[in-house]
């Protein structure tokens, strides 16, 4: 049962796990660039995962092979491409697992492909899992997806499948979830993509809060549909600016907006933050007849020559914080998330200031930790919270916050977040 229409929340089946911190397109966009300097900058960014290599070669070595060697050397990980036979450039980011209709021999063809991938990558320490789909929204895809996942479980029970999409675009979320999240083995991972900072979104005020609420609705939908399922999810957060047909479509988020996206995702139980995108450059969107549909120019965490943008340094700082947070969060189960405008009955929080979001975490039975997110991105602020516990500790800094009559004050960075542990005084003295 998945109680998606109630404020009651069923704790996650699996703990959050070590946070995945990753980037899309780490080796250039419209041209391959993965020299020693590029690799040093990736390491310095504080990531542990890379994804989505373009189809390119350097001295007969594919971009994917170059990236895997990098991951092997630096202790990072990468899901590998999985696609059916007949792959074409038009299918670059879509329908890899499900483009082929299910027919006699479908499972055998999947098995053959998985065995080929295992043969190719079995010695690679960075071989993390299988990227099996992208934006496969039609309900009819679910049958093929289910069979693909079943064969993967049989052939490689030690690695997860990953797929990407916007939860609100699936014709049937339940059909997708039922097909993708298999019981047993490593939890499969859904990567949810949603970008809200379009060119006219203000930097503060009600207009910004409305866009953030749109973001949260998607995150909450993922969390609620994951209830009772053996799975995890990652948030693909907007890090890019984007120009389409010569006009600004997305503005590049500020440092505070990068933080708030990560915090809001974690408040809904995300197990990873994946930045879209790392590299800069142009993309020509073609239709199936190779006719140009749209030209897009991206500004990512580094520019087209690989030089860091201000967003690179903002993400670098954020990742440092997330690594410290992960040390505690990885062992906890997600117990539900909510906002200060809609506070359901819960065992930790009694009252709160406005424009905040919260995530509850614990051992899968009892909640013990409270993630507090500042939805205001314009300035740091100090907020008052009412709790049921008598002691509150910041688990990253170790700071003990003074609680008087069930209330305390906590300082939050613009768009920032803190993980607090609450407990009766007698339990910790």
Image (spheres, rainbow, N blue to C red):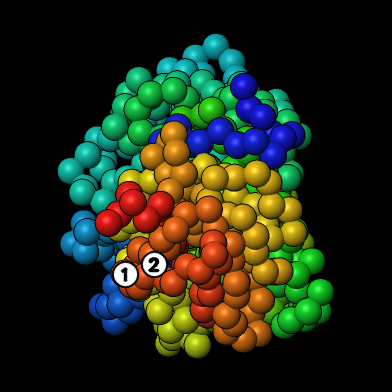
The answer to which of 233 and 127 lies nearer the viewer is 233
Quadrant that contains the C terminus: bottom left
Residue 223 location, x and y as percent?
59, 42
Residue sitting at x 24%, y 35%: 119
Residue with the mark numbered 2? 394
Question: Up-down: is 217 above or below 205?
Answer: above
Residue 153 location, x and y as percent?
38, 24
Q: Is residue 79 left or right of residue 1?
A: left
Residue sitting at x 44%, y 72%: 402
State the image quarter where residue 321 is shown: bottom left
Instruction: Determine the CA span between mark 1 and mark 2.
Output: 5 Å
The answer to which of 45 and 103 lies nearer the viewer is 45
The answer to which of 290 and 64 lies nearer the viewer is 64
Q: Is disc 2 placed on a helix, strand or loop?
A: strand
Q: Is residue 175 left or right of residue 323?
A: right
Residue with the mark numbered 1? 398
Do the residues bearing badges 1 and 2 touch, measured as CB atoms within 8 Å? Answer: yes
Q: Is residue 30 visible?
A: no
Badge 2 density bin: few <14, some 14–19, many ≥20, Cα 10 Å: some
Badge 1 density bin: few <14, some 14–19, many ≥20, Cα 10 Å: few
Residue sitting at x 38%, y 46%: 332
Q: Is residue 76 left or right of residue 332?
A: left
Residue at the outermost front position: 405
Question: Up-down: is 124 above or below 247?
Answer: above
């Amino acid at each position: 049962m998945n109680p998606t229409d109630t404020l009651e929340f069923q704790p996650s089946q699996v703990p959050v796990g070590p946070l995945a911190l990753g980037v899309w397109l780490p080796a250039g966009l419209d041209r391959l660039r993965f020299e020693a300097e590029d690799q040093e900058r990736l390491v310095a960014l504080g990531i542990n995962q890379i994804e989505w290599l373009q189809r390119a070669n350097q001295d007969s070595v594919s971009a994917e092979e170059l990236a895997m060697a990098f991951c092997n050397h630096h202790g990072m990980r990468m899901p590998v491409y999985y696609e059916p036979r007949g792959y074409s450039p038009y299918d670059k980011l879509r329908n890899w697992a499900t483009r082929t209709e299910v027919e006699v021999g479908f499972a055998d063809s999947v098995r053959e492909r998985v065995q080929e991938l295992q043969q190719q990558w079995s010695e690679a320490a960075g071989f993390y899992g299988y990227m099996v789909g992208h934006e496969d929204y039609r309900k009819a895809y679910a049958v093929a997806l289910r069979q693909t996942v079943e064969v993967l479980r049989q052939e490689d029970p030690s690695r997860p499948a990953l797929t990407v999409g916007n939860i609100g675009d699936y014709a049937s979320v339940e059909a997708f979830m039922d097909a993708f999240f298999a019981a047993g083995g490593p939890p499969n991972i859904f990567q949810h993509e949603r970008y809200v900072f379009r060119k006219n979104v203000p930097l503060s005020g009600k207009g910004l809060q409305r866009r953030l609420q749109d973001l949260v609705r998607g995150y909450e939908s993922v969390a609620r549909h994951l209830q009772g399922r053996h799975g995890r999810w990652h948030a693909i957060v907007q890090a890019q600016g984007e120009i389409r047909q010569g006009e600004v479509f997305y503005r590049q988020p500020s440092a505070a907006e990068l933080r708030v996206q990560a915090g809001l995702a974690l408040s809904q139980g995300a197990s990873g933050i994946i930045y879209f995108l790392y590299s800069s450059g142009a993309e020509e969107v073609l239709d199936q007849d190779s006719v140009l549909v749209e030209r897009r120019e991206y500004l990512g965490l580094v520019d087209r020559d690989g030089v860091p943008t201000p967003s690179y340094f903002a993400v670098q700082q954020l990742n440092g914080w997330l690594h410290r947070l992960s040390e505690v969060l990885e062992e906890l189960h997600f117990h539900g998330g909510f906002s200060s405008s809609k506070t359901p009955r819960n065992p930790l929080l009694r009252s709160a200031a406005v424009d905040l979001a919260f995530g509850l975490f614990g051992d899968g039975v009892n909640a013990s930790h409270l993630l507090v997110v500042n939805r205001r991105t314009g300035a740091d602020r100090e907020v008052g919270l009412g709790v049921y516990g008598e002691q509150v500790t910041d688990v990253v800094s170790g700071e003990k916050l003074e609680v008087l009559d069930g209330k305390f004050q906590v300082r939050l960075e613009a768009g920032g977040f803190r993980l607090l542990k609450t407990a009766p005084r007698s339990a910790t003295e």
